[in-house]
Image: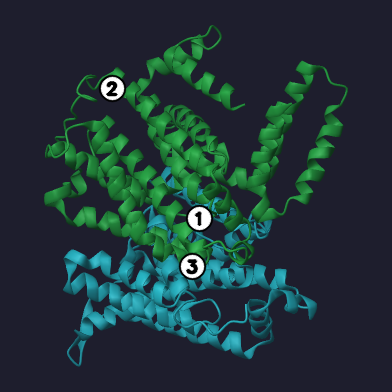
Chain colours: A cyan, B green
Amino acid sequence: MLTILFDGIAYGMLLFVLACGLSVTLGVMNFVNLAHGAFAMAGGYITLVLVNRAGVPFFAGLPIAFVATAIIGAVFERTLYVHVYNGTPLDQVLFTIGLVFMSVAAVDYVMGSQQVFIQIPSVLQGRFELFGIGIGRYRLLIIIVCGVLAVALQLILSGTRFGSRLRASVDDARVARGLGIDVNRVFALTFAVGSGLAGLGGALGAEILGLDPTFPLKYMVYFLIVVTVGGTSSITGPFLASLLIGIADVAGKYYVPKFGAFVIYTIMIVLLILRPQGLFARASSR
Amino acid sequence: MEYAFWVAAFTSIFAFGGWLAELSSFFSNRHLILTEIAWLGLFALSLDLILGYAGIISLGHAAFFGLGSYAAALFAKHAIINEPVLALIVSGCIAALLGFATSFLVLRGADLTRLMVTLGIALIMREIANQLPDLTGGADGLQGVTIAPVLGMFAFDIFGHVAYVYCLAVLFLLARRIVYSPFGLSLRAVKGNPLRSSLIGMSINSRLIAIYTLAAFYAGVAGALLAQTTAFASLDVFSFERSADLLLVLIIGGAGYLYGGLIGAVIFKLMQDWIANLTPQYWQFWIGLVLVLIVLIGRERIGLWFAMARSLAARALHSSDKSGASLLREQRNELHHASRWNGDIDHRSEARRSGGDH
């Protein structure tokens, strides 16, 4: 029981790191980025190549995945996404679906279509018992890394000047521009960091979620659920939503395996019907 | 314009007309592609009803398509309804029921919520089909379906397939009748400005529910067509790729004037056929590239090119004194006046129509 809770929390934390970049894109630019999962996949495959083929240690591979994906994200943002911000929602959906299709086929072409695994160091394999709870070492690592990241993000967002600029931009981009905040630059930076986090999440999650070229399609729904349920106005919303979804999904698959996949979709639809603005959204003036 | 379209369509099917002979022989060699175009065109038409006329973006239209598909396959397999045309209509009605039930969910929330809810419904339908292997065959698909002759007369060969083109024509005319009726016009008003339409006394929700249900019916019929022509139904009918491809089909053809779905289906299938011959495994990449390019170039601009090319051709025929450059300027000004989200699709269809009238 508690083991399931533990696994669920690890899964939820992972979802949070994967999806929090998406919630910012959506919040600041009102941009529906369905291709977010492609960045996660990029991070996963970069780590895979580094660790499995080049022999880079796993713990060094993670930060490299973060930086590399952030750079990829920044390049894409400046060259492609920037043209679509003012587009209609339909344009944005078409554009990002197109990117997803391209990334899926491109990775299939370069890396092959089979599922792959990153070699993790033996320290992280296996599980141990603590107060009767079976704790997987790797999942513990995920919880620690993601927990630290979540706290750091929250501190940056609430404590630094950049954080307050970002919050201002999310709340009302027009007024923020009027106050002299360069919203586009804030956004570009956030997009890069968000992509980097997704890449890190993809690298960390390859062990649990599996890594194959259809990754962006398979998990797109999960990211979107986190964002729509959690809302885009804060970082705690998506965080709690990810935990809720992670635990519900793991528990659902364990207790009612026959209906495992229904649980998550049903939760999503019910929540969206009850709270169309998201579970933790503030009363918004807009 | 409209007549020209139908003349072209029918000549290509029945191999009449001199200069179309090559095209028609191309099609008759690939009559399978013709039936695929029939169901894809109908499917795209059903998306056009909600996207082009009511402004609802759906990422899960495959839910209705798949339900219709499984319904038709099950009717035929268990000999519940043997007559294919009747089975087609009943399958459509079943999909329409689902459409009616889910339309209330779709009404809530704005674009993103709608995307999520439609996507979620399609995924749930897929899971249901996956979890009921006794009924649907699960991941293996539903096999052993035999389809009775159409109307008890035409056996299911190429002539049976041609019967489906009639079916498509009937449904198309019905849709055309509906969108040009007062109901269809009021839908456009709702899409253009919901607040204003409600102020002049329109009931927005009932209109959206009606059109969503109708679109679900069309999608169900399209799915049933697929199941009957292939005598097979699999989980693939619910897939996300199907809904996404459908958006591409409609966008290639242009949303909001009904013909877009049919034209898009023809272009998409020919393109898919061509690309799949070049790179069987990676054709999705090129589909994605087309999507990205369409958005980056801009749907309005592509529509403008088409309209311009047509106008120029018409001008050349009539040897008018107006130069192409001034025409371009004129149409650009027109484009600037059209408001973006509400106007682009409407404007495009206007441009097409006015282009064809010269």
Q: CA distance from mark 3 to mark 1?
A: 26 Å
CA neighbours of label 2 inside 10 A, class few (<14), some (14 to 19), many (20+): some
The subunit letter for the residue under badge 2 reads: B
> In the displayed structure, does residue A131 sit left or right of residue B206?
left
The subunit letter for the residue under badge 3 reads: A
Q: CA distance from mark 1 to mark 2?
A: 34 Å
Secondary structure found at label 1: loop
Of the numbered discs 1 and 2, the one sitting upstream in the chain is 1
| Residue under the image location 33 percent in, 40 percent down | B221
Q: Which residue is mark 2?
A: B160
Residue B240: image tag: none
In the image, are marks 3 and 1 on the same chain?
no
> In the displayed structure, does residue B317 sit left or right of residue A106?
right
- Identify the image quadrant of residue A183: bottom right
Determine the residue located farthest toward the bottom in the rendered image. Answer: A131
Q: Which amino acid, mark 3?
A: Ala
Q: Which residue is mark 1?
A: B57
CA neighbours of label 1 inside 10 A, class few (<14), some (14 to 19), many (20+): many
Q: Which residue is mark 3?
A: A198
Determine the residue located farthest toward the top in the rendered image. Answer: B18
* Circles 3, 1 touching at the beta carbon (< 8 Å): no
Q: Can you give x and y, in whole percent of width and height, for residue A162 in the image?
A: 67, 82
The subunit letter for the residue under badge 1 reads: B
Q: Nearer the viewer, mark 3 or mark 1?
A: 1
Q: CA distance from mark 2 to mark 3?
A: 51 Å
Q: Can you give x and y, in whole percent of width and height, for residue B91 in the image?
A: 27, 43
